[in-house]
C-alpha cells in the first residue's frame, strides 16, 4: 500500500469494504462489548482486558481477524497489509508505520522469516524496541519540595491525573501539596479541591486570576510545611493559543524564580484518543516549557495510543505514567512490552 | 494603530499563501503539490484514467490518514473518489493532479453534508437537548455555548441541568458556565440519580415555561456498558428532540469506533465538533460523519462561550486536505490580482532573491484590489480564521494607505535594502509620510518578521508557515496577549 507492498489491485479490496458500506465494516457487534465490563470501581476488567475488547472490534475492520492472521500458511501481501492496518488503526501514523513495515521487510529477508507467527513476533519486537526508550520511570530526587508542573490541551486529563498522582506519591510515603494553577476554566479550582479532599492533602488556591502567582504561593506554602512534592495544575490550552503558551512559559519561569532548580518535572498529559496532533502537542509544549515526561490518559477506552510510536521517532519523551480510568487508583507506570502486547494482542 | 499593523502583517501573509496556491510546487503540505509530484509526466492528458490516478489515489489515502481519517473510512472514500473520477475530463490548463484534487475536495465536502444545519426546536416546549460524548470532549462548555447562542439569536428562555454525578465539580462547572451564558441553571447534587435529576428539571422547565432544556451528562466510554445503559435510559425518559454527540476534532482512528457505539446506543440527531481552534487536521469529522450519517451542526472554536460557529463543510474539507479554501482564493485572485505579477513574485522568491519592501507594498495593494480582507479570511482554514479574529478582524483602507505612504516616502534603494534605514532616514521618511517615527519603526519590524516568515515558508512549506505566522503575531503582541482575543 505505501510502496512497500507490491502494487496489486487495490480496488478489489476496497470494493470488498464498500459492499457492506451501510453496513459499515465496523458494524459487527461493537457495542455488545464484553458483557462483563461494568464501570463500577470494584469488578472492573483490567485495562488490558479492555484494550483487548477494543481490539476485538478493530479486528472486524481487517480483511481477516487478527487471530486468523497468523494461522495463515505463509506470508503474503495481504497479511502484510493487515499488519499495516493494525498499526495505522492504532494511530501509529503513516511515517512510523511505513518505517516499521520497511524494517519488517528487511528482517523477513535477513532472517528468512517464513511463518506468520514469527512475523507477528518480529513486528511486535520492532515496535517494542521503538517504545522501550520511553520507558523511564519518574525518580523523585532530593529536591524539596520536588516541583511537578502539569500541562496539556483542554480536557486531556490533567486535573484527574494530579488526583491520581497525589495518591500514588502518598502511598510512597511522600507528602503532597496541590496548586490550583487553572484560574480560567469554570470550577477548575473546585475540581482540584475535590481531589485534594479525596487525598486529604492541602490545595493552594487564590481568587486571583494569575496562575504564576498561585504556583509561587504554593511553593512557599510547601516550604513552610516541609512538604515533599508540589503538583501544579494548569489550565488546558491548545498550542495555537500563543498568548496562553506564553502564559504557561511564564508559570515555568516563576517556578524557577521560586526555586532555581525547579521545576523538577514538567509533565505533558496526552489523551490516548487523540490522533497525529499529539505530535504537535509534544513539540509545542516542549518548546515553551521544556517537557520532561508524558502521561497518556484514557487507555481504558478503545483507543490504542499508538501515536507514541510517532512520538518516539519524532520527539521522544519518557512516558512516566498511563491513565486507565477515572478512579483515584487508575494510574500505572508505562511498560513498553504491555503496551505493544495490547496492540498486537500477543499477551494472551 | 498597533492593532491594524498586526492585521496588515497578517493579510500580507495571506497574500503569500495565495501566491503559493497558484504555484503549488512550493506548497509541500498541500495535496495538490503531492499529487503534482506523482504525475509530473502526465501533463497534457485529457482524462483521468485507471492508469494515471492509481498513484495519485495512494497519495490521497496517505494525506487522509495523516489527517486522522480512520482507515476504513479512507478505504471507502477512495473507492468513491475513484468511481467519481474515472473518465472525467481534465479541463483547460489543469493537470490531472489538480483535476483529481477537485474531485476529492467536492466529494469530501459533499460527504460532510451539503447545507448548514441549525438546532431543531420544533416541538411542544420545552425542547429537550441531550448532550453526550467521551470524557473531556467539551459537552459542558458546549452546553453553555449553545444556550448563549439560542438565547441571544433566537430569544429563547433556557434552562440547563447537569446529570454528571460522577466527575468532581462537574455540576459546579455547569452552574458557572450557565451564569456566564446568561441562561438559567437547575441545581442538582452528586448524590442524586441522573434519572431523578432529569425528571425534576423537566418538571421545572414545564412549570416555568422554558423553551429549551439542556441536559448535560457525564463523559463516558463507549465500552462502558453501565454508563451507556444509563444514558439510553435518560434518552428514553426525556425523548429529547436533539441528541447531540460532542466530539473532539483532534480524535484519532478510534473516532469511528466511538461514534459507531454512541450512534448505536442513542438515536443521535447531530454532531458537534469541538476544539477546532487547534491545529489538528480534523479528519475525525469525516470518520464520525461517515459512520453515523448524522449532520455536523456546530463547531467549537474556543474555550469562551462565544467560540461557536455553524459548521461549514467546505471549510472542513479544505482543512482535512490541508489546503484552505484554495479554490475560493484562486477565484478571488483571478478577479483582483495581476496574475503575471503574482507569478513573477513567486519566481523571485524561489530564486532566493528574497522579499523586499517593494513586494510588501505590492502585496498590500493587491489585497485591496481583492475586495478586502474579510472575504479572504472566510476562505482560509479555521486555524487562520481564528488567528485573524485575534488580530482584530478587518483592516481599514486608511491604514493600508498609511503603510503605502510610508513606503512611498522611501528611496528605491531603501526599499530594496531596508537595513539601510537608520535614525536620520527614519525621521525623513516619517516626515514625508506625515506619521510619527514609531510607525515607521513598526512597519520595518513588521516587514522584517514577514521576511523571516517568507524564508521559513519557502524552506518548509505550509505547516512551517502557519507556525511562523503564529510566531509573528505573538511577537507583535508585545509580551503576550492580544487585545480582544478569546480569553
Ligand atoms: N476513562 C478515563 N477518563 C479519564 C482519564 N483521565 C481523565 N479522565 C476524564 O477525562 C475528563 C477530563 O479530565 P480532566 O482531569 O478534567 O482534564 P483536564 O486536562 O484537567 O481538563 P481541563 O482542565 O478542562 O483542560 C474527565 O471526565 C475525567 O474524568 C482516564 O485515564 N480514563
Ligand atoms: N480551545 C477549545 N477548548 C474547548 C472547546 N470546547 C471545550 N473546550 C475545553 O475543553 C475542556 C473540556 O471541556 P468540558 O466542557 O469540561 O468537557 P466535557 O465533555 O463536559 O468533559 P467531562 O464532563 O469531564 O466529560 C475545557 O477546558 C474546555 O474549556 C473548544 O471548542 N475549543
Ligand atoms: Mg483541569
Ligand atoms: Mg462535563
Image (cartoon, grey):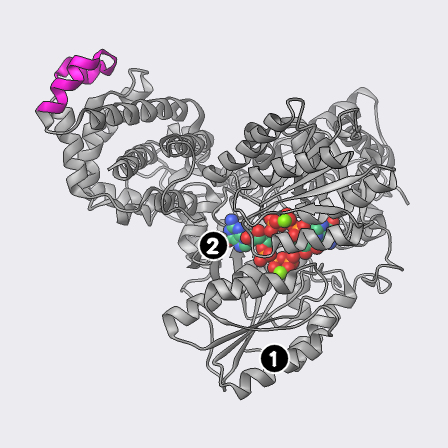
Which residue in the structure is indicated by mark 2?
B304
Tell whether B433 sits left or right of A258.
Answer: left
Quarter in which the N terminus of chain A is drawn: top right
Q: Where, by quadrant of the figure, is residue A343 drawn?
A: top right
Tell whether A208 sits left or right of B481.
Answer: right
Which residue in the structure is indicated by mark 1?
B201
Q: Residue at horizontal 41%, vertical 51%?
A: B315
Q: Give the range drawn in magenta.
A: B411-431
Q: Is residue B452 above or below residue A209?
A: above
Q: Where, by quadrant of the figure, is residue A31 drawn?
A: bottom right
**Which secondary structure lies at badge 2?**
loop
In front of the other: B304 or B226: B304
Tell whether B31 sits left or right of A84.
Answer: left
Label 1 resides on the chain identified as B
Q: Residue at horizontal 75%, vertical 60%?
A: B223
**Which secondary structure lies at badge 1?**
helix
* Count of marks placed on residues: 2
In front of the other: A210 or B206: A210
Q: Which of marks 2 and 1 is nearer the N terminus?
A: 1
Quarter in which the C terminus of chain A is drawn: top right
Pointer 2 local density, CA inside 10 Å: few below 14, some 14–19, many at least 20: many
Label 2 resides on the chain identified as B
Where in the figure is residue B276, as x and y percent of width and height? 49, 50
Where in the figure is residue B148, as x and y percent of width and height? 44, 66
Amino acid at each position: 500500500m505505501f510502496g512497500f507492498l507490491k502494487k496489486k489491485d487495490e480496488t478489489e479490496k476496497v470494493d470488498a469494504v464498500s459492499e457492506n458500506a451501510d453496513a459499515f465494516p465496523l458494524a459487527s457487534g461493537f457495542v455488545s462489548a464484553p458483557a462483563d465490563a461494568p464501570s463500577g470501581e470494584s469488578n472492573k476488567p483490567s485495562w488490558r482486558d479492555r484494550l483487548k475488547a477494543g481490539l476485538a472490534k478493530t479486528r472486524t475492520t481487517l480483511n481477516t481477524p487478527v487471530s486468523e492472521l497468523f494461522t495463515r500458511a505463509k506470508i503474503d501481501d495481504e497479511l502484510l497489509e493487515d499488519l499495516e492496518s493494525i498499526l495505522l488503526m492504532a494511530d501509529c501514523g503513516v511515517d512510523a508505520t511505513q518505517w516499521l513495515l520497511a524494517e519488517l521487510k528487511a528482517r523477513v529477508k535477513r532472517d528468512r522469516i517464513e511463518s506468520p507467527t514469527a512475523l507477528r513476533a518480529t513486528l511486535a519486537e520492532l515496535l517494542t524496541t521503538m517504545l522501550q526508550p520511553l520507558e523511564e520511570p519518574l525518580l523523585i530526587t532530593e529536591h524539596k519540595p520536588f516541583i511537578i508542573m502539569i500541562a496539556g490541551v483542554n480536557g486531556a486529563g490533567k486535573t484527574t491525573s494530579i488526583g491520581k498522582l497525589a495518591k500514588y506519591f502518598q502511598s510512597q510515603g511522600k507528602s503532597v501539596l496541590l496548586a490550583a494553577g487553572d484560574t480560567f476554566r469554570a470550577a477548575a479550582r473546585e475540581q482540584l479541591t475535590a481531589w485534594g479532599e479525596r487525598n486529604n492533602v492541602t490545595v493552594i488556591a487564590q481568587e486571583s486570576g494569575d496562575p504564576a502567582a498561585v504556583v509561587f504561593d504554593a511553593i512557599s506554602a510547601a516550604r513552610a510545611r516541609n512538604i515533599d512534592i508540589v503538583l501544579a495544575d494548569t489550565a488546558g490550552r491548545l498550542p495555537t493559543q500563543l498568548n496562553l503558551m506564553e502564559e504557561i512559559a511564564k508559570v515555568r519561569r516563576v517556578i524557577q524564580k521560586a526555586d532555581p532548580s525547579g521545576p523538577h518535572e514538567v509533565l505533558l498529559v496526552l489523551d490516548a484518543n487523540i490522533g497525529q496532533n499529539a505530535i504537535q502537542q509534544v513539540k509545542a509544549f516542549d518548546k515553551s516549557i521544556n517537557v520532561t515526561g508524558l502521561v497518556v490518559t484514557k487507555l481504558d477506552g478503545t483507543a490504542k495510543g499508538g501515536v507514541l510510536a510517532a512520538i518516539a521517532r519524532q520527539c521522544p519523551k519518557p512516558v512516566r505514567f498511563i491513565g486507565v480510568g477515572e478512579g483515584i487508583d487508575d494510574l500505572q507506570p508505562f511498560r513498553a512490552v504491555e503496551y505493544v502486547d495490547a496492540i498486537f494482542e500477543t499477551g494472551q | 494603530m498597533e492593532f491594524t499593523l498586526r492585521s496588515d502583517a497578517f493579510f500580507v501573509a495571506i497574500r503569500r499563501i495565495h501566491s503559493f496556491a497558484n504555484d503549488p510546487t512550493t506548497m509541500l503540505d498541500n495535496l495538490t503539490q503531492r499529487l503534482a509530484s506523482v504525475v509530473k509526466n502526465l501533463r497534457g492528458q485529457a482524462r483521468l484514467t485507471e492508469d494515471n490516478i492509481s498513484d495519485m489515489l495512494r497519495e490521497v489515502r496517505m494525506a487522509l490518514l495523516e489527517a486522522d481519517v480512520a482507515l476504513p473510512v479512507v478505504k471507502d472514500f477512495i473507492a468513491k473518489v475513484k468511481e467519481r473520477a474515472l473518465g472525467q475530463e481534465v479541463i483547460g490548463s489543469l493537470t490531472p493532479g489538480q483535476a483529481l484534487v477537485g474531485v476529492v475536495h467536492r466529494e469530501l465536502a459533499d460527504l460532510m453534508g451539503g447545507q448548514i444545519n441549525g438546532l431543531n426546536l420544533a416541538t411542544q416546549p420545552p425542547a429537550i437537548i441531550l448532550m453526550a460524548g467521551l470524557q473531556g470532549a467539551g459537552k459542558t462548555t458546549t452546553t453553555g455555548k449553545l444556550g448563549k447562542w439560542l438565547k441571544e439569536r433566537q430569544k429563547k428562555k433556557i434552562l440547563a441541568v447537569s446529570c454528571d454525578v460522577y466527575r468532581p465539580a462537574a455540576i459546579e462547572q455547569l452552574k458557572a458556565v450557565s451564569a456566564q451564558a446568561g441562561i438559567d441553571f437547575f441545581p442538582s447534587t452528586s448524590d442524586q440519580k441522573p434519572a431523578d435529576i432529569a425528571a425534576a428539571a423537566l418538571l421545572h422547565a414545564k412549570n416555568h415555561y422554558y423553551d429549551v432544556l439542556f441536559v448535560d451528562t457525564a463523559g463516558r466510554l463507549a465500552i462502558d456498558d453501565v454508563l451507556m445503559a444509563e444514558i439510553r435510559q435518560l434518552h428514553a425518559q426525556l425523548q429529547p428532540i436533539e441528541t447531540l454527540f460532542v466530539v473532539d476534532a483532534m480524535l484519532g482512528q478510534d473516532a469511528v469506533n466511538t461514534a459507531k457505539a454512541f450512534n448505536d446506543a442513542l438515536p443521535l440527531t447531530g454532531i458537534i465538533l469541538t476544539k477546532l481552534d487547534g491545529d489538528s487536521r480534523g479528519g475525525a469529522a469525516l470518520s464520525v460523519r461517515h459512520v453515523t450519517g448524522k449532520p455536523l451542526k456546530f463547531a467549537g472554536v474556543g474555550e469562551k462561550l462565544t467560540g461557536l460557529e455553524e459548521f461549514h463543510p467546505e471549510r472542513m474539507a479544505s482543512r482535512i486536505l490541508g489546503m484552505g479554501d484554495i479554490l475560493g482564493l484562486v477565484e478571488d485572485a483571478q478577479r483582483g490580482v495581476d496574475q503575471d505579477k503574482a507569478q513573477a513574485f513567486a519566481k523571485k522568491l524561489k530564486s532566493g532573491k528574497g522579499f523586499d519592501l517593494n513586494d510588501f507594498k505590492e502585496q498590500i495593494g493587491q489585497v485591496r484590489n481583492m475586495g478586502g480582507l474579510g472575504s479572504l479570511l472566510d476562505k482560509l482554514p479555521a486555524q487562520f480564521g481564528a488567528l485573524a479574529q485575534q488580530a482584530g478582524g478587518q483592516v481599514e483602507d486608511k491604514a493600508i494607505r498609511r503603510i503605502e505612504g510610508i513606503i512611498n516616502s522611501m528611496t528605491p534603494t531603501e526599499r530594496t535594502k531596508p537595513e539601510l534605514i537608520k535614525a536620520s532616514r527614519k525621521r525623513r521618511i516619517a516626515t514625508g509620510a506625515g506619521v510619527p517615527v514609531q510607525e515607521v519603526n513598526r512597519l520595518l519590524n513588521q516587514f522584517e518578521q514577514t521576511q523571516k516568515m517568507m524564508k521559513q515558508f519557502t524552506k518548509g512549506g505550509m505547516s512551517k508557515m502557519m507556525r511562523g505566522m503564529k510566531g509573528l503575531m505573538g511577537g507583535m503582541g508585545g509580551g503576550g496577549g492580544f487585545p480582544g482575543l478569546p480569553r
